[in-house]
């Protein structure tokens, strides 16, 4: 079964907005076993809309159209659909009632004439109720193509695609009860090509699983996807594949639940009832920002000293002036004393310290841009590390530096060798 | 003149990657005075590629195609272009020499046979040299359509579009010497609809300027765009429009150079030879992270104390235990003492302190989620502020909180009333 996607609207055709809906829809359709042959986009122009709907109608079995269902005169999708199918627009009672209900909840009653325009749907179409917005969608046969019309607002489109479109497509495909199961493994510290090499044989061993790699800097995500009727069997299959992958590259997998590094670290700290303080130089607050992006982080995160100057490392963290003089700011001895200082002044169980050169300036022959020293303080010792990684951009370097520090503490807490 | 855009590749058609190239290209073409009538996307399938190129060739004057120029067997754009135009692929000497040069710089000499495949271009095409990557582009007439083929890698595409494609399109349009001038004004603290209302008449007063609003959370950008032959006149026109806008909403415009809030603040601090320390509670390190994203920030940024616990506010920043006991952490008196503490322990000229409730938990009837207290310490006093803004998401709240704090200090430094 072949499908096309059509996104509509001047804001997309003229480039004011990047169309992220089409990628989302394409992935869901491909996952459902439908081949996506084309994406299309046209602006708010009735003639162009009618021609492209007719073309798609002559080429494709299924189409998903987004946008143009709103109340304004720019919103032309229903009219274009009616013209393309050679039918009239009629007041659709299901659409009208669902809108009425939505408006009553939102602002106390259906309003203007332009609001009501949204309930005018092509004759012969079936209304697709929008539970999270005003504009109803609909599905209409245009020539040989079952054409689904959805709002352009991403969260409305996603909700209606999942609740109303994909189940109808499953029926068209003759799938009785179908379960779609996804598992995401998050990898840090291996390049996409390396992950791909390690998993070379996975397609042969797990031929029923669809596997995809996504570079999501600074992570690589491995997506495992299966569909079928036996829910328990599908979960077992995913468990097996996950086990196989963890045997190969478990060292670099920090989440099997699509969680961020800071969420995974926070979960472990909370479980251990441990607390954390940070001393940041080159990461400049990024580590504490990441940690505090997690709701509930105040249970384990106590303090970060972003000590950007040597003097503040001495005054606030208690780094010895001799260490700064003899070793400089970027040195394992310095991060050792920074991590000790962070623990000492906050009373935390664990400490992280970073000092390095994020660039673009500040590098020397001995310590070039990308040099990174990390200290991980535990209740019994401070472990120190030196790295050299330059990704060419200050913000990318800071991101990698922070991820390495969080990952080192995560491994320390789990007893995994660094 | 009408144009279409075609992006190619399974990673886009199947939804693994969001196509951001098409929006970029569309905006540049529209700015150049070309009407973009359609975007299209097909996967790595020769037959589909040939048909869509022929269709576009019969409909459009100009087309920009991205992707499929690489060395692998999936890269089919040259072959599809040749078939669509009914010509052969030939070794293009310009392409071969430019690739040779690029490879010599990169890895010491042109390599494999698959590398050389990239120099096979359709007969009659003109090579478009790629100065920043291996795959050359080309331009070929397919039916009535001048079809430009560019790499899919965004920075390569952008470079070649600007250097090679747009000048050729200007020539096609018969524009002798054309200057494209853009100015971006960055607004914080006004909703898009409010900006739009304030600028209601701008299109009548400055009818030669194209004006666009872009919501770029948490900023609104106002894009002014003009084109023409008289460079000096265009700049004056933009200056006038900028002046008109600043008269209306200057209070909320923090940059006329497309700089970030933290860059603008850093520039002012550096000019004044002033230094800054921060005391962060609810922003959790985000303020220092933003400030240190700016290269050279070590010239003015000394220290941030991310004091997430009451005890660390007392121990590290010297907030009085009585203040915490009587006022709580989220209070103007508390941020006053935090800001004073940050200045005192770091020796900075200015200080920022934040304390608030980012959510989702932690709110009370008296201090709901979204409550924010800010202290701005100057060499002579500490100004304090209370806000209540809940954007419903922890990370969005942190972002808004940090921006407000940076904006308050920026206004303080410039003598603009808060």
Image (cartoon, coloured by chain):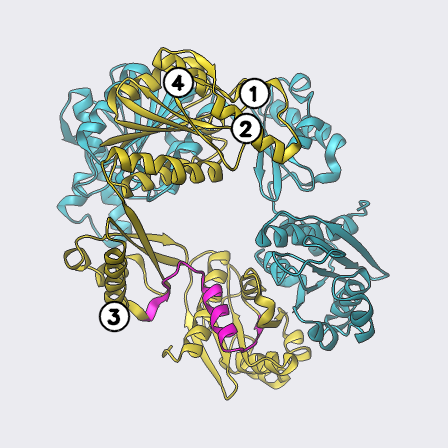
Chain colours: A cyan, B yellow
Chain assignment, label 2? B
Query: Quick one: label 2, few (<14), some, or many (20+) residues within 10 Å?
Result: many
Which of pointers 1 and 4 lies earlier in the amino acid sequence? Answer: 4
User: Looking at the picture, does residue A201 appear above or below residue B342?
Assistant: above
Which of pointers 4 and 3 lies earlier in the amino acid sequence? Answer: 4
User: Looking at the picture, does residue A343 appear above or below residue A360?
Assistant: below
Mark-to-mark CA distance, 1 and 2: 8 Å
For label 3, the SS is helix
* Position of residue A111 in the picture relative to residue A223 (left or right): left
Q: Nearer the viewer, residue A232 or A45?
A: A45
Q: Which residue is mark 1?
A: B116
Which of pointers 1 and 2 lies earlier in the amino acid sequence? Answer: 2
Residue drawn at x 44%, y 68% is B404
Pointers 1 and 3 within a single chain? yes
User: Which of the 4 image quadrants contains residue B239?
Assistant: bottom left
Q: Which mark is residue B247?
A: 3
For label 4, the SS is helix
Which of pointers 2 and 4 lies earlier in the amino acid sequence? Answer: 4
Report the mark closest to the observer, 2 or 4. 2
For label 2, the SS is helix
Query: Quick one: label 4, few (<14), some, or many (20+) residues within 10 Å?
Result: many
Pointers 1 and 2 in contact (C-beta within 8 Å): yes
Query: Quick one: label 3, few (<14), some, or many (20+) residues within 10 Å?
Result: few
Mark-to-mark CA distance, 1 and 4: 18 Å
Is B252 contained in the magenta span? Answer: yes
Q: Which residue is mark 4?
A: B81
Q: Which mark is residue B99?
A: 2
Mark-to-mark CA distance, 3 and 2: 52 Å
User: Looking at the picture, does residue B65 appear above or below residue A334?
Assistant: above
């Amino acid at each position: 079964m072949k499908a096309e996607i059509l996104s509509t609207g001047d804001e997309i055709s003229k480039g004011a907005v990047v169309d992220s809906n089409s990628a989302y829809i394409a992935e869901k359709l491909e996952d459902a076993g439908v081949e996506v042959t084309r994406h299309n986009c046209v602006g708010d122009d009735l003639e162009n809309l009618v021609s492209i709907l007719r073309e798609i109608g002559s080429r494709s079995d299924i189409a998903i159209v987004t946008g143009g269902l709103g109340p304004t005169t720019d919103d032309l999708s229903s009219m274009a659909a009616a013209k393309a199918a050679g039918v009239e627009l009629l007041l659709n009672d299901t659409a009208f009632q669902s809108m009425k209900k939505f408006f009553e909840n939102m602002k106390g009653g259906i309003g203007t004439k332009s609001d009501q325009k949204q309930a005018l749907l092509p004759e012969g179409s079936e209304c697709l109720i929008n539970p999270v917005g005003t504009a109803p969608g609909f599905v209409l046969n245009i020539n040989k193509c079952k054409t689904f019309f959805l709002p352009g607002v991403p969260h409305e489109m996603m909700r209606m695609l999942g609740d109303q479109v994909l189940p109808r497509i499953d029926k068209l495909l003759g799938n009785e009860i179908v379960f779609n199961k996804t598992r995401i493994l998050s990898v840090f510290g291996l390049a996409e090509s390396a992950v791909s090499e390690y998993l070379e044989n996975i397609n042969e061993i797990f031929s029923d699983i669809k596997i995809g790699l996504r570079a999501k800097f600074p992570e690589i995500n491995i997506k495992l996807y299966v569909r079928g009727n036996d829910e328990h069997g599908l979960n077992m299959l995913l468990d097996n594949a996950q086990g196989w992958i963890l045997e190969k590259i478990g060292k670099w997998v920090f989440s099997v639940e699509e969680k961020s590094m800071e969420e995974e670290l926070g979960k472990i700290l909370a479980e251990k009832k441990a607390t954390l303080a940070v001393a940041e130089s080159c990461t400049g607050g990024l580590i504490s920002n990441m940690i505090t992006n997690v709701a509930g982080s105040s249970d384990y995160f106590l303090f970060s000293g972003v000590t950007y100057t040597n003097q503040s490392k001495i005054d606030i963290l208690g780094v010895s002036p001799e260490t700064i003089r003899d070793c400089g700011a970027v040195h394992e001895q310095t991060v050792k004393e920074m991590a000790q200082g962070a623990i000492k002044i906050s009373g935390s169980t664990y400490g992280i310290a970073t000092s390095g050169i994020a660039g673009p300036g500040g590098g020397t022959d001995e310590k070039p841009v990308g040099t990174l020293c990390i200290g991980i303080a535990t209740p019994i010792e401070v472990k120190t590390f030196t790295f050299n990684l330059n990704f060419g951009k200050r913000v990318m370097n800071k991101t990698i530096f922070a991820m390495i520090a969080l990952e080192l503490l995560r491994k320390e807490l789990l007893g995994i060798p660094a």
